[in-house]
Image (cartoon, rainbow, N blue to C red):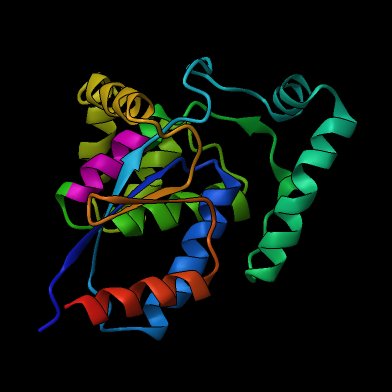
Amino acid sequence: MTKTIKLDIMSDPICPWCYIGKAHLDVALADHPDHPFVIEWHPFQLNPDMPAEGMGRREYLEGKFGGKEGAVRAYAPVVEHAAQAGLSINFEAMKRTPNTLNAHRLIHWAGIEGRQTAAVAALFKAYFVDARDIGDTEVLADIADSIEMDAAVVTRLLASDVDAQDIRDRDAHSRKVGVNSVPTFIVGSKHAVPGAQPPELWAKVIAELASAD
C-alpha cells in the first residue's frame, strides 16, 4: 500500500489560475490512480479588502489593471492556458467580482463532511462557467445542496460569523509564511510548488514520490 502524502492547496474560487491548476492536477491524478496524495484546500483571498457585497467586474478589472487595455492584456494568457486545459471561462457573462470569504467558509464546512474538493469544483464551475455571484448566500446554499450538503444549515451558518475569523487568520498565516500568489501547492508539508503547473510536472512528482518509498 502506498504511503499517503498531504497535498495542501492554497487557492481562491475566483482565481482563474487556480481553476486551471486544478484541471491540470485532475488530469495527472486520473492518469495515476495510485497517487499518494491526500488533498486539503486552504483559503487565500485574492482581494481580502473587497467590500462584502463585491463590486462590478469591469470596475474591479479596470481599477486593478489600469484600464480596459491593461485588463485585456492581463487576461490574454489566462484565456490561452484555459483553452489548452480544455476549460471554458465565460468572461463575457461575469458581471460582479465577489468577496470570497463566505465561499471559503463553505469550502471549510465541506471539508468537515469530506466534500471539500467537490465544493471547490462546484464553486469554480459556478463562477467561471455559469457566471454566478459566489458571494451571494443563496448561490452558496444552492452550491451546497448540489454537493449533498444541507442547504438550510449552510444558510444559517452564513447568516452568522461562524468560522469567518478562522478563515481570515488562515489566510494571514499563509501570507506570513511566504505565500503571495495562488495556486500554491505544498507537497508533504515541505516543498512548495507555485502556479498552475502542467500535468507532466505532477506526473514527475508522483513518480519521484513512488521511487522514494
Position of residue 22 in the picture relative to residue 159 (left or right): right
The x, y position of residue 174, in whole percent, is 33, 31
- Picture quarter containing residue 86? bottom right
Position of residue 191 in the picture relative to residue 193 (left or right): left
Q: Which residue is farthest right?
A: 69
For image coordinates 81% across by 21% down, the residue present is: 66
Q: Quick check: is 182 in the magenta stretch?
A: no
Q: Is residue 142 visible?
A: yes
The x, y position of residue 31, in whole percent, is 41, 85
- State which quarter of the image contains the C terminus: bottom left
Magenta stretch, residue numbers: 104-111
- State which quarter of the image contains the N terminus: bottom left
- Compared to residue 23, the image places residue 90 above or below, namely above
For image coordinates 23% across by 50% down, the residue present is: 189
Q: Which residue is farthest left?
A: 1
- Compared to residue 101, the image places residue 28 above or below, namely below
The x, y position of residue 191, in whole percent, is 32, 52
Q: Can residue 150 be seen in this view?
A: no
- Compared to residue 66, the image places residue 82 above or below, namely below
> Dominant secondary structure of the magenta stretch?
helix
Position of residue 67 in the picture relative to residue 74 (left or right): right
